[in-house]
Structures are given as C-alpha cells and as structure tokens.
Amino acid sequence: MTAIVPLIPDNAPFSPEQRAWLNGFLAGIFSRSAAPQSAGAPAAALTPLTILFGTQTGTAETLAKQAAKEAGKRGFAATVLDMAATTAAQLSQEKNVLVITSTYGDGEPPDNAKTLHAALAAADAPALSSLRFSVCSLGDTNYTAFCQCGKDFDTRLEKLGGQRIAPRTDCDLDYETSFTTWLDASLSALGSATAAPAAESTPATGAPVEYSKKNPFSAPVLTVRNLNGTGSAKEVNHVEFSLEGSGLVYEAGDALGVLPHNCPEHVSHILAALGCDGEEAVPTAAGELSLRTALTAQFDLGKPSAELLALLGATARPELHHVIDVLLAHPDKRPAPAAFVAALKKLQPRLYSISSSPKAHPGQVHLTVGAVRYDVHGRARKGVCSTYLAERALAHGTAGVFVHSNKAFRPPAQGDTPMIMVGPGTGIAPFRAFLEERAASGAKGKNWLFFGDQRAETDFLYREELAAMQQSGLLTRLDLAFSRDQKEKIYVQNRMLEAAAELYAWLEAGACFYVCGDASRMAKDVDAALHTVIQTAGGKSAEEAAAYVQALKAAKRYQRDVY
C-alpha cells in the first residue's frame, strides 16, 4: 500500500519557509512509513539540510521548496531559507547546504541575495570549514554574465573552506532537467537514504488539468491594442487573454509566461540558407514535425548555441548574433535537417509582468508589451515574443500561457499602507494591476505613481485610465517625466529628487516603495535617487541612508520587478 503524503495547506498558520520544511519533513516520514522495519528497529534519524534561495522573480524560491519536498522523501529534514534572512555567521554554523540562485542584470545577485553575497566576499567573512555544499545557478545564456551570481557563491564558499559535494550546475532558461539532475546528485552526495524517485505518474482519468510551463494553456487572444499615438518611436501593445475554463489563478504582481512562435519570414530565411523546402521531417520533443513547423514553434533561432557553432565549424564572434548569421557566414555548410535542429536550443517562453487585477477582470489576464524591432548588419530583427503578440497572436487566435508566481512583488498586505510606484515605460504594467487591485478591494491607502517615457503626446500609456484614477481619488499623486518634451532630458529619478521631502515623509509614514522596468540603467538610477532622497530629506549620511534602504528591503517595503 502506498503511503499518502499529507501537505500543509497554503492557508495554514505558517510562513512559506515553515510550510516547505514541514512538507519535506512529513514527506520524509510518510515515504518511509510504508517500508517494513524489523521489530524494535529504531527509526532512522533525519539529516539536517538547509536550502538557500536567491531570487528576483520567484523561480529559485519555487525550486528550493521543490528541493525540500524531494529531500524529505530521502531522509532529510530540510529548511528553506531566504538569503535575505541569512547571515554569513549563521552559514558558518551549517553542515549541509544547497544553494539555488538566479542572476539578474549584468551578473548581479538578485535583491534578496545582495547582502549575503557581499558578506561572503568581505575580508572578514567567517570560515566555513564545516560546510558541505552544492550550488545550482539559474540564468540565461543570452546574457554575457551567464549565471554569474551562482558562480560567485560557488567560488566563495569553497574559498572560505567549504567542501563542494557535487559540481555546480548552471541552468539555462530550460532548467527543469538540469535542476533535477543536480538535485539528485547533490542529495546522493550528502548521503540520502533512498534512491531517486520513479518518474511522475500520469494523473488519473478525470483529474483536473494543471497548466504550467511544461503544459501551457491555449488562451484565446481577446485584444491587441496599440497604446502609442501616431508618430511615436515606440510600439507598446495592451494584450488581453481569456483564462476561462483553465483553472489558472494569479495575483497582482505575478508574471505571465507566453510561448511565442518565430516569425514566418525569419523561418523562410533559415530554410533558404539550409537549401530546404520546409517539408523535411525532423524529430522534436513534440514528436516528428515538418522542419518549417519545428522551426516556427519548437526551436530558438536567436543566439547560436555552442553545438551549432561546432556543427558548422564556426567560432563565436560578435557579429554572429543569430542562427541566420552563422548560416550565412558559412554558405558551404548545409547540415542535414535532423542534425541542424538537434544543435538548436529549445524555444523558451517569455515572462511579462501582468498588468491586470483578477478582481477587476475575472477570467482575463492583461499584458503591456513593447514590440522590439531593430537592424543588425542591414537585416531587420524582431523580438520573438513581443512581435508575435503584436503581429500574429490575434490572427492565430490563441497563445500558450501559464502563470509565474512572484511572491516577492506584491501590493501591501494592509490596505491602508501608502504605496509609491516607479514604473516608466512598460514598467507601468504591474502598477496598473496594483491600482486596480486596490480599487476592487476598497483599500484606503494613498497611492503615488512616477511614470515617464519619451513624449507625452504619443507615449503616455493608459493616460485616460490614470486620469480617471486621479479623479476618483484612487491615485493620490502622479508625477510624470517625458524625456524628450524639452531640451534637457528629464527622467523619473529626477522627479523623485524634486519631490524628495514628500517622498521621504511617505516612507516615514510606512509607505512601501516599488520599482519595475529596466534593470541595467533605470533601476540603478532610481536606487541611487532613493538613497539621495533619504540623505537630503532625512538629513542622513551616505552610510545611514544605505542602512535605511537595507531596512526597507528587510521589511519587504522596497520591492523590485526588474529585467
């Protein structure tokens, strides 16, 4: 008889970390309860295990809880810890640690990992001679500093005396298989009591379908509407999907994963370079497909993989941005279709901040997406998903979607807490959702939005909606920064500095501070402006301002959704 593992429900009076630990603990007990034991034999002691996560969008936290559950089945008492709640001194007392962390921006640690990352790099970092560890790093090979944060932790833990019990694994966007392999190797190396579990069983007939990244929901595309005025240098689209019948639920602050299709014209260029007509049959994870269909819906035609470069006898060069560039640079190399697709990366979903509240739009989910278009070597290039949504999704009728929970980015739990939001350009997306959520729930807290873009006439996204929110009193204050409406460029961080005294007063009154948008420039500039506001309006030194900001982060009053 198979033991049923009881799970602690989400509404139980425990923190997420406590629930994860209890789930793992109970899984460990009940997975072993079905195994026969000799009379009088003592139960095996559970092995303590700490699982640290560093996350920006919630993926690493989700994987950490998944790891804890699996560890519980294998004889471990696993504790999941947010890196923001972990000190280097605490780490020096640990015996068995698994680290799961993402990287964002130009190789930087995620927000909740920055303090621990800096503490371990400091000259006075404690020795970790008793520590056994392994690191799983999440990243994106399209970025130069791929998985840099995980590499940093891996190097530093070893340098401080820790023993690496399994090699670090650097996961690309398609991380599931790599993560599972790493977890199995790490738990085995730490001395897990049982073997790896069998493959997941097929759900019983009649069980509700659970939609996810592996099994997206084909959501009807309801609306694709350009938010820019005539003459704008940008194209930002408001996109609406129906979730009716899917069972998918989301909260304000979450992201929506969208599985795109490659541009048909781009696919035709690839086929021409290969000398193929597109009808050739090739193997894919979805079964045997025509080459044209496979290149459209299954494979990434962007940055060439190392396998493709090797197949074509090419070397990585700055001018080889995309797969088509490599093919055109080696016209004498025409690999067989099956060999060609085997050397391509899987087409990955794109995550977009959700711009609607489920309370305001039951059965729907909205996105705010800027279409990316540019030229490289005289050839027009397109953002894969952004232009799929802009040009073809509505005609196609449906798009594969799933909800990506981001518990680290939520409006204040208390409706009377003031809220300051900084979201230029498409960064306004989650704040539209936050404001709709507060309106629908009757929250009475004050709301202040900093929004900016290039020109007020053409780039004032959701102008009418924001005006209505101001008129109703929902939006207490709206500060605008249109950079090209005057000779001197003005950005949201400039407006923050202009309103330093009131902004600081809001913070002192308990306001939560939110930022959404570009990580490499805007978010850094806004962070610097926040420090300056606290120094000037609060009369604090640079060190005191830094401590103030750190306290905001520790209290979850400074949250960022940056990319």
Image: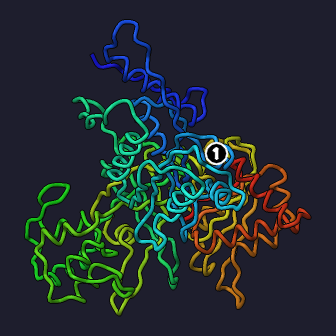
Between 259 and 347, the residue placed more toward the observer is 347
Residue 347 in view:
yes
Q: Identify the residue position indicated by label 1 in the image.
A: 92
Task: Please identify the quarter of the rendering in which residue 205 is found.
Answer: top left
Q: Is residue 537 left or right of residue 495?
A: right
Q: Is residue 528 left or right of residue 296?
A: right
**How many C-alpha atoms fall within 10 Å of the one at disc 1: few (<14), some, or many (≥20)?**
some
Q: Residue at x 56, y 54 (%)?
A: 157
Q: Is residue 195 above or below residue 61?
A: above
Q: Residue at x 74, y 55 (%)?
A: 550
Where residue 95 appears, as percent x and y from the top left, is 56, 40
Q: Residue at x 37, y 55 (%)?
A: 175
Where residue 397 appears, as percent x and y from the top left, is 29, 59
Q: Is residue 414 above or below residue 32?
A: below
Q: Is residue 541 above or below residue 209?
A: below
Where residue 379 appears, as percent x and y from the top left, is 33, 89
Where residue 208 appears, as percent x and y from the top left, is 31, 33
Q: Residue furthest right?
A: 539
Between 25 and 371, the residue placed more toward the observer is 25
Tell me which amino acid carries mark 1: Ser
Between 390 and 336, the residue placed more toward the observer is 336
Q: Residue at x 55, y 29 (%)?
A: 11
- Total marks shown come to 1
Residue 59 in view:
no
Image quarter in which the N terminus is found: top left
Please, which colouring scheme is shown? rainbow
Task: Please identify the quarter of the rendering in which residue 452 is found.
Answer: bottom right
Secondary structure, mark 1, is loop
